[in-house]
Image (cartoon, grey):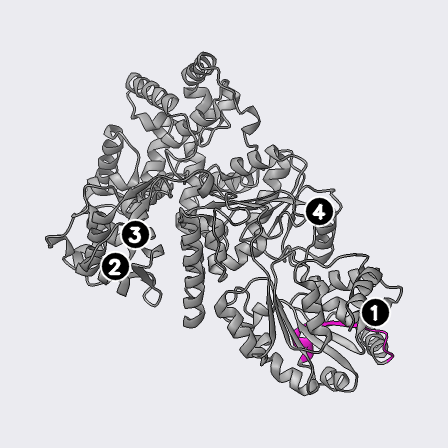
Amino acid sequence: MEEIDLQLALKKYFGFSDFKGLQEPVIKSISSDQDTFVIMPTGGGKSLCYQLPALIKEGTAIVVSPLIALMKNQVDAIRGISNEEGIAHVLNSSLNKTQVKKVKSDITEGITKLLYVAPESLTKEENVEFLRSVKISFLAVDEAHCISEWGHDFRPEYRNLRLIINRIGDNIPIIGLTATATPKVQEDILKSLGITGAKTFKASFNRPNLYYEVRPKTKNVEADIIRFIKQNASKSGIVYCLSRKRVEELAQVLQVNGINAVPYHAGLDPKTRVKHQDMFLMEEADVVVATIAFGMGIDKPDVRFVIHHDIPKSIESYYQETGRAGRDGGEGHCLAFYAYKDIEKLEKFMSGKPVAEKEIGNALLQEMVAFAESSISRRKFILHYFGEEFDNTTGEGGDMDDNIRFPKKQVEAQGDAVIALGIVEATKEKYKPKDIVNVLVGKTNALITSHKTHTKPFFGKGKHQEGRYWMALIRQLIVAKLLKKDIETYGVLKLSELGKSYIKEPHSFMMTEDHIYDEDHDENISVKGNLGGGVANKQLMNMLKDLRKSNAKKLGVPPFVIFQDPSLEDMSLKYPISIKELSNVHGVGEGKAKKYGKDFVALIASYVEENNIMRPDDMVVKSTGLNSALKLYIIQSVDRKLSLDDIASAKGMEMNDFIKEMEGIVFSGTKLNIDYWLDDLLDEDQQEEIHEYFMESETDSIDSAIDEFDGDYDEEELRLYRLKFISEVAN
């Protein structure tokens, strides 16, 4: 085929005068009936690579694609460039008999150039029979990474494609296309499709216009997202969440806060989905909040930011999702919020899966952790993952990430690394990270006592550092492959060969400082997140603490009764200067604001004035009232003295989450009388003992209470009594 023909064809069918990147050599390869393998990042113009040859070659090209929505988009696009409706068709389960008949007659008459099918449709005998009888120009497998178990979107039905192709005809040229494939997956695809001799074209995965950033995910993540979107007002963006429920909630919160957002997930009815997708494309909505179901094949060139509310399951997914930003070469900001708890959640999801799947899933997850926690260039990290080397000084977009622009402080941790690895070895490799941290800082629990580890000379060897330091170091030792988590035994730490040789011959280990992780020990405060993380004003925080202390003294109650630490932190973040504003602060509520707030707002107001502080007045995040129905139900049910177990199960909640909801109600200043339940749980003397403890205690931390009582009471009992205490003393 002459060169000029291709140029002409490109102009004629698509109106472009030039090919992009590798398009031209790929099209030449396909046009000359060669097996071809194309690895081209999202937005590189992959679809055109098979669309143009299909239009100019004799016969019909079959395109195997995993998603119906994706097929529909492509068919519409091809029909748009031709005056023949039948030039492109879909053949899948959504068609009725008449429609199937029409498709087959258009193919027989030579009108149809592109036939889009799902792999399942190809397994049907009648379809195979029919396709054997017509001229097939080639078969393109789109999203070819679905073939590989190591791909991030494995689909078993893709595995049989080779067999099916053999049944349809001999010598049909095969084209595999993917936007994400690690070296391992590439090898898998070529083998599985039986095209090991294919001509391979691999475009660079570097997207120099994208800026990568990872921030710690705190309890204020919604406010952080709203703030970011408002700073980028009227720009188009996508926010990804892992669950449908979260998509719905976040879309509502954004709407309530004046952002034009729509939800998108597979659970919406098809009509709504199409409507929301069109609103986004037509710029009637600025932001789509979506699960990963969104975006497959969505080609909106001017998406200016992609936010990950939850960290994705693999680097591939992350690359694909962030790749939807800045397709036009303009700005594209990729912001991910990261908390290790989210990773643990994802691990939990996988625990019921078959072993092989679990292993692979966990391996992909650990790569994601390494990416989030890494202090090296994020671009370099991603490209290395896809088997491409990158030099930050000479490569395009070398400074386009937060680690390069704002390098994190590193400290030498050689000595501590040897201690941590030595403890894993000394405890015979049978503990998970949390237990190893306990051994290091010298904290006992039931498991440690049963193994008599607390009697060993190495117990408490790491007392010179706190627990969260060790947790961070262990994670970084995993990333550096000195330690590995054993998947079979649900995350028990093992030494790798590298780790064993490191103990014998230690060398420099630079640990990145200042990554803020979620505090594991703050599990029980109704507000999760990093205290002292975020951007709270430390000076004001200390002044508020002093005020709280002196007011508590006057009233004869412990300080936390007035406001808890997370509430003070939120005050030093939002600077409320009226009782109304104070009642919007985390964990305060109207009752509490009126009862204790006067002195606090006066202090904050004079502080704001003296220090010329710009108040983030737009940042009082309005809530959606989503939870208010649940809160009302809980309050009414407790008033009726219903069993707490029954109330929780009526709402499909675990006891832990249910107590959390009650804490939210009580800590914001509403009374809940759960005496009827506590009286069955604890006798009078026990209640008195716990009451005295909280009265004299500086903190309401449950961990501290468990330590104080030395395991006499379990966590649930103490949390429930704390509810009674705060209800009576504070509210």
Q: Nearer the viewer, mark 1 or mark 2?
A: 1
The answer for how far apart the CA atoms under marks 2 and 4 are is 49 Å
Query: Regarding mark 1 in the picture, which secondary structure is present there?
Result: helix
Q: Nearer the viewer, mark 3 or mark 4?
A: 3
For badge 3, the amino acid type reads: Ile
User: Does residue 216 appear anywhere in the picture?
Assistant: no
Instruction: Find out whether the residues at labels 3 and 4 contact each other: C-beta distance under 8 Å.
Output: no
Pick whichever of labels 2 and 4 is earlier in the sequence: 4
Pick whichever of labels 1 and 2 is earlier in the sequence: 1
For badge 1, the amino acid type reads: Ile
Query: Regarding mark 3 in the picture, which secondary structure is present there?
Result: helix
Pick whichever of labels 1 and 4 is earlier in the sequence: 1
Snapshot quadrant of residue 25 = bottom right
Q: Residue at x 23, y 42 (%)?
A: 465
Closest to the observer: 298 or 704?
298
Name the residue that disc number 4 marks.
Answer: 280
Pick whichever of labels 3 and 4 is earlier in the sequence: 4
The answer for how far apart the CA atoms under marks 1 and 3 are is 58 Å
The answer for how far apart the CA atoms under marks 1 and 2 are is 62 Å
Above or below, 142 relative to 632: below
Q: Can you give x and y, in whole percent of width and height, for residue 717 in the image? A: 30, 44
Name the residue that disc number 1 marks.
Answer: 87
Name the residue that disc number 3 marks.
Answer: 474
